[in-house]
């Protein structure tokens, strides 16, 4: 057999491949590389397939999308899915197989079905949400109480984003003049570095929790194809477990991202996020107004009741005074009678006591003693109590019941 040159052999392979696979085929694969040539506009990709159990590569092929087709396909795909045509996504593409003698085997993309990618994206979102639910953290942020007065706001956004400017303008020019303290924590809000940048911003806020009431994540003004960066597990888990209520206003109206699903409150745009905070302040102001009116009405009613009571008391004072005076007079008269009776009783008791004392005194008088047979002898007007104190010749007077006896003291024989 005559040997073939490499070129001839590759030409044979090309003809054989074109004869065996002349049609267009729909192929499912993952994009592992997407590269657009800056000069020609052609898009060069690499398709891969991985083992679902080991995640090892089991198939790989180069592909190309010519510039005239790529411009149409990318716009159609990104508008339909809200996902950038970039590496890491799964696609369903219509391809033709070709072989070039110099460049080898490749697939030429003719069409793309965005519904397949949408389904895969939805599946990934469901898987992330299911994992968060299994871990018990899916609704943690939603369960946090929203502050009554959310005035101190930590904002995660790109400093140059139009949405951030709209957010600030809306808060600063609110019709009621409410004060909001806003601090920006800059972050990349699109592309592959979004997750890492936002996680760093969340960490910086977490270190100053006492300084803020709520965290707000806003984007606004970007392409919808960049929303896939908000569908990552790490970012969703961090937001779900964040200790401050998170408000998202990412600026889109399609189905919620995973970040929207775990946040405390989701609104459509940065302006809507500002309106939410202003409305929250309005509600608090309304409740304060209601309480103020309730207090005012309560005080007014109480004052009116007290005025009526005072008026009634004023009307009752004359009648009550007359009645009290009458009652006092009657009481005084009764007291006077009681006092008279008490005085009379006391005088009677004291009179009886005096009579008893008088009787006792009378019984103890010298006359009574003399009447009983006793006598008393006096010398010089003093009673003689000791006979040895007498001298012969002393004149004594002895008193008896009836009369007196004079005697002279004689000496003893």
Image: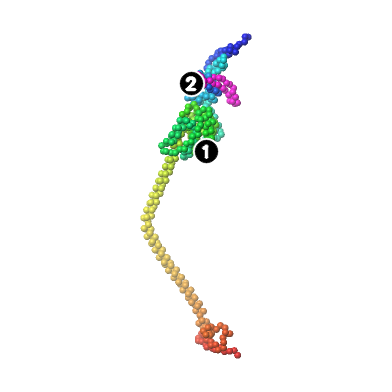
Q: Residue at x 38, y 59 (%)?
A: 321
Kindly identify which numbered label has been placed on residue 264: none
* Residue 185 visible in this rendered orientation of the protein: yes
Foreground pick, 172 / 328: 172
- In this figure, which residue is indicated by the disc labeled 2? 71
Q: Is residue 284 above or below residue 50?
A: below
Q: Bounds of the magenta span?
A: 36-63
Judging from the image, what secondary structure is the residue with disc 1 in?
Answer: loop
Q: Residue at x 55, y 21 (%)?
A: 46
User: Which of the 4 quarters of the picture holds residue 410?
Assistant: bottom right
Residue 234 covered by magenta stretch: no
Upstream in sequence: badge 1 or badge 2: 2
Judging from the image, what secondary structure is the residue with disc 2 in?
Answer: helix
- In this figure, which residue is indicated by the disc labeled 1? 208
Q: Nearer the viewer, mark 1 or mark 2?
A: 1
Q: At which x and y percent is residue 92?
A: 52, 22
Residue 58 covered by magenta stretch: yes
Q: At which x and y percent is residue 5?
A: 60, 11
Image quarter where the N terminus lies is top right
Q: At which x and y percent is residue 19?
A: 55, 13
* Residue 25 visible in this rendered orientation of the protein: no
Foreground pick, 177 / 245: 177
């Amino acid at each position: 057999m005559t040997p073939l040159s490499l070129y001839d052999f590759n030409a044979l392979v090309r003809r054989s491949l074109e004869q065996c696979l002349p049609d267009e085929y729909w192929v499912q694969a993952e994009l592992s590389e997407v590269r657009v040539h800056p000069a020609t506009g052609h898009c060069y990709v690499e398709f891969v397939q991985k083992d679902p159990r080991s995640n090892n590569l089991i198939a790989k092929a180069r592909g190309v999308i010519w510039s005239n087709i790529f411009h149409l396909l990318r716009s159609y795909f990104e508008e339909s899915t809200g996902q950038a045509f970039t590496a890491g996504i799964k696609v369903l593409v219509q391809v033709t197989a070709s072989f070039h003698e110099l460049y080898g085997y490749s697939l030429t993309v003719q069409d793309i079905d965005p519904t397949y990618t949408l389904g895969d994206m939805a599946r990934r979102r469901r898987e992330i949400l299911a994992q968060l639910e299994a871990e018990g953290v899916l609704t943690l942020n939603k369960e946090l109480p929203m502050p009554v007065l959310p005035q101190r706001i930590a904002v995660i956004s790109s400093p140059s984003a139009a949405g951030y400017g709209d957010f600030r303008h809306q808060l600063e020019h609110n019709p009621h003049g409410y004060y909001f303290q806003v601090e920006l924590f800059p972050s990349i809000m699109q592309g592959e570095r979004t997750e890492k940048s936002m996680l760093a911003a969340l960490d910086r806020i977490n270190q100053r929790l006492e300084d803020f009431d709520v965290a707000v994540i806003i984007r606004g003004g970007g392409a919808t194809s960049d929303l896939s960066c908000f569908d990552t597990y790490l970012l969703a888990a961090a937001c779900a477990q964040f200790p401050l209520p998170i408000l998202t206003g990412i600026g889109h109206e399609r189905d919620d991202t995973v970040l929207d699903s775990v946040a405390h409150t989701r609104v459509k745009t940065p302006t809507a996020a500002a309106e939410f905070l202003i409305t929250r302040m309005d509600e608090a102001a309304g409740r304060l107004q209601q309480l103020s009116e309730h207090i005012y009405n309560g005080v007014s009613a109480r004052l009116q009741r007290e005025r009526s009571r005072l008026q009634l008391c004023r009307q009752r004072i004359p009648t009550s005074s007359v009645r009290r005076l009458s009652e006092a007079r009657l009481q005084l008269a009764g007291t006077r009678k009681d006092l008279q009776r008490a005085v009379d009783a006391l005088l009677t008791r004291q009179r009886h006591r005096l009579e008893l004392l008088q009787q006792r005194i009378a019984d103890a008088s010298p006359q009574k003693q003399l009447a009983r047979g006793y006598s008393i002898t006096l010398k010089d007007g003093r009673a003689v109590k000791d006979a040895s104190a007498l001298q012969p010749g002393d004149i004594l007077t002895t008193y008896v019941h009836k009369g007196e006896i004079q005697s002279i003291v004689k000496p003893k024989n």
